Image: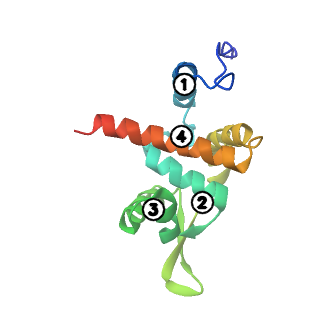
C-alpha cells in the first residue's frame, strides 16, 4: 500500500490554530478511511460486530479479564448496558463469562483462547498505532491529546443532536 502524502503543514510550527485544523482535516479522514478498510476476519464476519463491541473486545485484549462492572466503567455505560453487550458477544461465542470464584454474584468476562488470535490480529493494529503515536509524548502531552479527541467527539455529537 502506498504511503500517504506528507502533510503540508506542521501544527507545532508556530501555534497557528487554522494550520492545525487544516492538518487534522487532512489526517483524520485518512485515518478513518484506513480503519474502515481493515477487513473483518472471515471467522467474525457473520457476527455483525458493532463499534461498541470492538471497544469492549479491545479493552479485554489490552487489560485482560474483568467484571461486567469494570467493563461498564471503561465503556462509560450503565452496567445493564455492559451486561447486554456481554450477553450478545457470549451468545456469538466471542466472550466467555464465568463466576468469580471469590464472589459468585459477580461474573468475570474474558476472550476465549480460541478467539484471541483472530481478534488480536484484527484489533491490535489500532492499539499499536496509538502506542506509536503516544509513547514519545510526555504524560501531560498525552493527556492533552486525549482531552482534544474527547472534546472533538463531544463537539461532533452536539452538532448532530437536535
Q: CA distance from mark 2 to mark 3?
A: 11 Å
In the depicted structure, whether residue 141 falls above or below residue 14: below
Q: Quadrant of the N terminus?
A: top right
- Lateral position of residue 108 relative to residue 9, left or right: left
Q: Sequence order check: which comes first, mark 1 or mark 4?
A: 1
Residue furthest to the right = 136
Q: CA distance from mark 3 to mark 1?
A: 42 Å
Residue 102: horizontal and vertical position, in percent?
59, 87
Residue that numbered label 2 is attached to: 111
Compare marks 1 and 2 and give the one earlier in the sequence. Answer: 1
Q: Give the labeled residue for mark 3.
A: 86
Percent from the top left, x then y, of residue 16? 58, 22
Which of 55/148 is in front?
148
Q: Nearer the viewer, mark 1 or mark 4?
A: 1
Give the Cα separation between the discs numbered 4 and 3.
Answer: 30 Å
Q: Secondary structure at mark 4?
A: helix
Could you give the CA–CA distance between mark 1 and mark 4, rounded to whole angstroms?
13 Å
Q: Tell me if label 1 and label 4 are in contact, CB under 8 Å.
A: no
Q: Which residue is mark 1?
A: 17
- Of tags 4 and 2, which is closer to the observer? 4
Secondary element at image label 2: loop
Give residue 17's position: percent from left, percent from top.
Answer: 54, 25
The Cα atoms of the two marked residues, 4 and 2, are separated by 31 Å
Going from N to C along the chain, the mark reached first, 2 or 3, is: 3
Quarter of the view holding residue 26: top right
Q: Which mark is residue 55?
A: none
Q: Residue at x 47, y 50 (%)?
A: 53
The percent position of residue 82, horizontal first and vertical second, equals 42, 62
Amino acid at each position: 500500500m502506498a504511503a500517504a502524502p506528507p502533510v503540508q503543514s506542521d501544527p507545532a510550527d508556530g501555534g497557528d490554530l487554522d494550520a492545525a485544523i487544516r492538518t487534522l482535516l487532512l489526517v483524520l479522514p485518512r485515518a478513518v478511511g484506513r480503519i474502515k478498510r481493515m477487513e473483518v476476519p472471515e471467522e467474525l464476519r457473520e457476527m455483525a460486530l458493532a463499534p461498541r463491541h470492538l471497544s469492549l473486545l479491545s479493552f479485554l485484549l489490552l487489560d485482560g479479564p474483568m467484571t461486567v462492572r469494570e467493563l461498564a466503567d471503561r465503556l462509560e455505560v450503565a452496567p445493564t448496558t455492559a451486561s447486554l453487550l456481554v450477553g450478545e458477544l457470549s451468545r456469538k461465542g466471542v466472550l466467555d463469562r464465568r463466576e468469580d470464584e471469590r464472589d459468585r454474584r459477580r461474573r468475570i468476562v474474558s476472550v476465549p483462547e480460541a478467539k484471541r488470535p483472530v481478534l488480536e490480529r484484527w484489533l491490535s493494529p489500532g492499539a499499536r498505532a496509538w502506542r506509536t503515536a503516544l509513547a514519545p509524548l510526555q504524560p501531560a502531552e498525552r493527556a492533552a491529546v486525549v482531552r482534544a479527541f474527547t472534546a472533538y467527539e463531544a463537539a461532533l455529537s452536539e452538532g448532530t443532536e437536535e
